[in-house]
Image (spheres, rainbow, N blue to C red):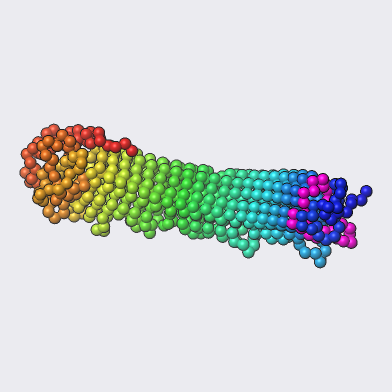
Amino acid sequence: MAKPLATSKDNLGKAVDIAVPGKKVAENAFSGAITLISADLIGSADSHGVEEIGEGAFEDCLSLSRVQARDDVKIGPYAFADCLSLSNAWFYDHRNGLLQVGTIGEGAFQECRSLAYVNLRSKGIGKMAFQNCTALKKCEVDELEEIGDLAFDGCGSLRSVTMPSKVGQYAFRDCTSLTEVIVQEGPHHYISPGTFSGCTALASVTIPDSILFIQENAFWGCSALKSVQTTATTIGEHAFQISGLESIKIGDGADLRRHAFANCHRLRDVEGRIGTIGPMAFKECTSLQSITLPTRVYPYAFYGCRGLTEVVVPDQTREIASGTFEGCTALASVEIPESVFSINESAFKNCEALESVRTNANIIRQSAFKDCHALKSVILTYTSPETVLIHEGAFKRCYALEEVVIAAKKVQIGPKAFANCVSLKVVTVPENSSIYSTAFQGSSVEKLVVLGELGQHKQYLNEFIESEEGIVESEEGNVEGYYSAKDNPLKIMGWTAANHKVLPENDKEKARTILFSLQRNVASDRLPHVPQEMRQMMFKPQPSDVYTKSTQRLNDHVAPE
């Protein structure tokens, strides 16, 4: 029995199987025809069948399960969208030299959740053309040049697809059964944003040398992807984040942008010269053990890389950015070149295995080495006259720290810079120093060595008294119980020789005494003027005992963090 002819929903009648005459199915012709099951668009041999299916022609035909058409048909936007029962779309080879290759419009088969297989001939697949076709396993498209944005987004059963050189954004997002991809050579030099994001089964990808830019989120969450080789010189933001990468080879001088490899917990090897490392580019790459840095590394680049043991910082590096190695708990040593001017906030915070630091950086910022519990030695050496700035909490809670040497012309040590360094015994500073009142709060400093001209010990004994409110002003250059020199006065606890004040008798119970015993080669009778009462405080009991008791009193007033 021949199928009834129909050109629109109006003359469909009760027919469930139809043949459509003519060369075009009009826009919305059968939209919402819920009784339609089958549509034959092939026609007779003389007519060559339908050449164009208009926009929305069969949209929302909920019972439509089978369509036959020529393989070069032009399919308009949303032509079969939401045909939830469509499982067979047969596009027969009907070539001749006069026919133009067809196209698949935007959303053409969107939400066709029963569609399992498609083969046709088309120059392009429009955006969202097969979006959420969750049963689609295979799509073969000859002469394909372009795939639009989100074209196969959410096609969780798709195993293979023809890949042109130009593929739109998020074209294969969440294609969780896609295992292999070969990117074709072509005039386009990039992999678009999010192209394969969420393709959790993708284990192999071949990227031609023509690809120079892998854009943001391109392989985000590809947990089965273990190895990638590319000559791309730009790896975009989040490009491989949360992927299963174990190794990657990149183009020479590659720019690795924000979160490029973040949370790649299996990544061990990065081959190729890196040009720039963006913020958090290797965040929590816990298997990464060694890497050679470029001169430009952005903040938190290696945050939480707990397996990182070796780092090479190149010459010409000007700064170590904030949080660069924070939480790298296995990092035991790092060589910091002389070119480094600044070690920024939290740069080495919580590097629990780091044992020593030697640098001539002029600025060590807040919490730069905080909680480096194994750090024993800090040596800051300088050949220039610039001021050294050690900011708040820079070495706080470095419990193993025993010695600090600052061989500079001038230093300023900020609040709690060495707070709670319970093993710290000896601190060497230049005579032109400014040390904040809480710089060594909770530490165990017994000896303060003051340097004159670089390398020359200054010969003074210093006693510092501090009230709850702090101490200010003095009437003369000589200080009672406090070192002074008219030329380069040492500034400790926030006061200079010119603004020191001895507490009145009735306030002395509030005072907290911290005693620093200077390494010196002069007799005690050459000390600066110190009142007899203060001398008794200094030498009875012994200095270390006074320091221990006074430190305990000081700790009683330490505010909780």
> Can residue 550 be seen in the rendering of this structure?
yes
Residue located at (14% from left, 36% from top): 508
Depicted 210 relative to depicted 307: above or below: below
Q: Quadrant of residue 98?
A: bottom right
Q: Residue furthest bottom?
A: 98
Residue located at (89% from left, 50% from top): 3
Q: Quadrant of residue 54?
A: bottom right
Depicted 190 relative to depicted 553: above or below: below
Measuring from the top left, give residue 118's x and y in whole percent: 75, 51
Residue located at (31% from left, 36% from top): 560
Q: How many discs appear?
A: 0
On whether residue 522 falls in the magenta region, the answer is no
Q: Residue furthest front?
A: 10
Measuring from the top left, give residue 376's x and y in whole percent: 31, 41
Residue located at (33% from left, 38% from top): 561
Near-viewer residue (427 or 466): 466
Q: Tell me where the magenta segment starts and ends, as one range.
A: 31-58
The reply, left or right, for residue 84 in relation to residue 260 is right
Dominant secondary structure (helix, strand or loop) of the stretch shown in magenta: loop
Depicted 494 relative to depicted 120: above or below: above
The reply, left or right, for residue 553 in relation to residue 251 is left
Q: Residue furthest right?
A: 1
Measuring from the top left, give residue 471's x and y in whole percent: 17, 44
Measuring from the top left, give residue 42's x and y in whole percent: 85, 56
> Can residue 268 be seen in the rendering of this structure?
no
